């Protein structure tokens, strides 16, 4: 296991390096963005996902999922199509120990929290360096700041009950997806807003 950091995952992301072909040390590809696992599966099945793509599955983290569902099906389909060395996948969802391929999960902060994974657009270049443990979106800070201005606030598909409460106060994966108190939530929000202004 390795923890990667970069402008996509300022608080970290996880990859099982033992599941990656040993010949892959770095990967550079074009983003193809999906706002759910189901959308990604459709694009893989219909042949839209091709060699050189980085499949970005977002809004599947603790808040967005909600509950951080497992993303095994998309990686299995990618590897099953013989693209395990040629297509990467990054997500704020999670993986099991059975995952193979260039599969990076637990991206934090997650999209629902306003993490930079939410700012990625189709065609953006992403660079993954397993040796130096980095994952970066090759887009300048000014462009990201402009995109952030137009980012719509996350709206959960869960509208009531305890799961709605969990969704509202869940932390990103780097904090274990646990529920925060109102005070912790406000502190975290202020901290994130302060980082965004830098």
Image (spheres, helix red, strand yellow):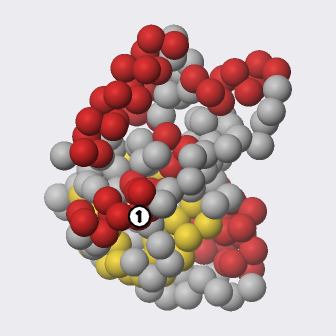
Q: Residue furthest right?
A: 160
SS category of the residue bearing label 1: helix
Viewer-side residue, 38 vs 88: 38
Is 47 left, or right, of 197 in this rendering?
right
Q: Could you tell whether 194 is left or right of 85 in the image?
A: left
Q: Is residue 2 above or below residue 122?
A: above
**Relative to 47, does residue 13 appear above or below in the rendering?**
above
- Please provide percent x and percent y for residue 46: 74, 85
Residue 159 spot, x, y in % from top left: 80, 33
> Relative to 101, is 113 above or below?
above
Taking depth in this image into account, of 154 and 1 the one nearest to the observer is 154
Residue 163 sits in which quadrant? top right
Relative to 49, 144 lies left or right: left
Task: Report x, y in % for residue 65.
Answer: 67, 43
Residue 146 in picture, x, y percent from top left: 35, 64
Query: Mark 1 sits on what residue?
Result: 147
Q: Residue at x 42, y 48 (%)?
A: 115
On screen, 194 above or below 80?
above
Q: Is residue 101 visible?
A: no
Pick the residue in front: 122 or 5.
Answer: 122
Q: Residue at x 56, y 70 (%)?
A: 33
* Any part of residue 150 in sight: yes
**Front residue of 159 and 90:** 159
Left or right: residue 126 versus residue 171 is left
User: Which residue lies at the image location 24% right of the left edge and 45% below the top edge?
Assistant: 197
Q: Residue at x 25, y 40 (%)?
A: 195
Query: Dot 1, crowdedness within 10 Å: few (<14), some or many (≥20)?
Result: some
Q: How many marks?
A: 1
């Amino acid at each position: 296991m390795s923890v990667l950091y970069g402008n996509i995952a300022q608080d970290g992301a996880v990859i099982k390096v033992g599941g990656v072909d040993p010949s892959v040390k770095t990967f550079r590809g074009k983003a193809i963005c999906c706002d759910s696992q189901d959308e990604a599966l459709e694009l893989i099945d219909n042949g839209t996902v091709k060699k050189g793509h980085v499949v970005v599955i977002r809004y599947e983290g603790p808040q967005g999922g909600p509950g951080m569902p497992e993303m095994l099906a998309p990686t299995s389909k990618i590897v099953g199509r013989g693209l395990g060395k040629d297509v990467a996948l990054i997500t704020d969802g999670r993986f099991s120990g059975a995952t193979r391929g260039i599969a990076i999960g637990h991206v934090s902060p997650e999209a629902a929290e306003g993490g930079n994974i939410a700012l990625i657009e189709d065609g953006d270049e992403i660079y993954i360096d397993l040796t130096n443990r980095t994952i970066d979106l090759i887009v300048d800070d000014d462009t990201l700041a402009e995109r952030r201005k137009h980012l719509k606030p996350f709206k959960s598909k869960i509208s009531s009950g305890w799961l709605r409460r969990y969704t509202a106060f869940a932390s990103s994966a780097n904090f274990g997806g646990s529920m925060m108190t109102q005070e912790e939530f406000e502190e975290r929000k202020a901290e994130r807003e302060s980082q965004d202004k830098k």
